[in-house]
Image: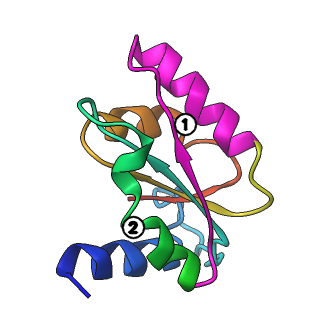
Amino acid sequence: MSLWRSLFVAASLLAVPLNLAHAQTPQTVKAKNVVLVHGAWADGSSWSEVIPILQAAGLHVTAVQNPLSSLADSVEATKRALAEQDGPTVLVAHSWGGTVISQVGTDPKVTGLV
């Protein structure tokens, strides 16, 4: 397994609490869903080698097809994909997708950003 593939599997199995600034001890929630967000010069198929690895690890995986017409449009596409998830979800992004998930990452379903 390549280093990148191992990184994606490990990162998606971890749940990183978003409220790290609070003094309370965060509860770890194991995500069962992963939403993948592609970069600017790609599309959802750019995740085609990562998806089967995550699925083999028992995760439900969704690759967002962002329109790339504007940040707002890409955020809305990602929000729609996140709304379809049942339970805790990790958002994983590459390149431009990092900007997108930083806008969506405050959703209560999101347990981590990668």
- Residue drawn at point x = 19 percent, y = 80 percent: 3
Q: Which residues are magenta?
A: 57-83
- Residue 63 lies within the magenta run: yes
Q: Amino acid at mark 2?
A: Val
- Residue drawn at point x = 45 percent, y = 78 percent: 53
- Residue drawn at point x = 41 percent, y = 18 percent: 71
* Image x and y of residue 75, in percent: 52, 26
Residue 14 appearing in the image: no
Question: Among all residues in the image, which is located at the extreme top?
Answer: 69
In the image, taking residue 103 as reference, residue 80 lies left or right, namely right
Q: Quadrant of residue 78?
A: top right
**As rendered, which of 102 and 8 lies closer to the eye?**
8
Residue 58 appearing in the image: yes
* Image x and y of residue 49, in percent: 36, 66
Q: Quadrant of residue 24?
A: bottom right
Dot 1, how many residues are within 10 Å of its Cα: few (below 14), some (14-19), or many (20+)? some
* Image x and y of residue 26, in percent: 59, 73
Q: Secondary structure at mark 2?
A: loop
Q: In the picture shown, does residue 13 fall above or below 79?
A: below
In the image, taking residue 18 as reference, residue 9 lies left or right, namely left
The circle on residue 104 is 1
- Residue drawn at point x = 57 percent, y = 76 percent: 55
Q: In the picture shown, does residue 86 fall above or below 95?
A: below
* Image x and y of residue 25, in percent: 58, 76
Q: In the picture shown, does residue 22 fall above or below 65?
A: below
**As rendered, which of 41 and 88 lies closer to the eye?**
41
Q: Which residue is mark 2?
A: 50
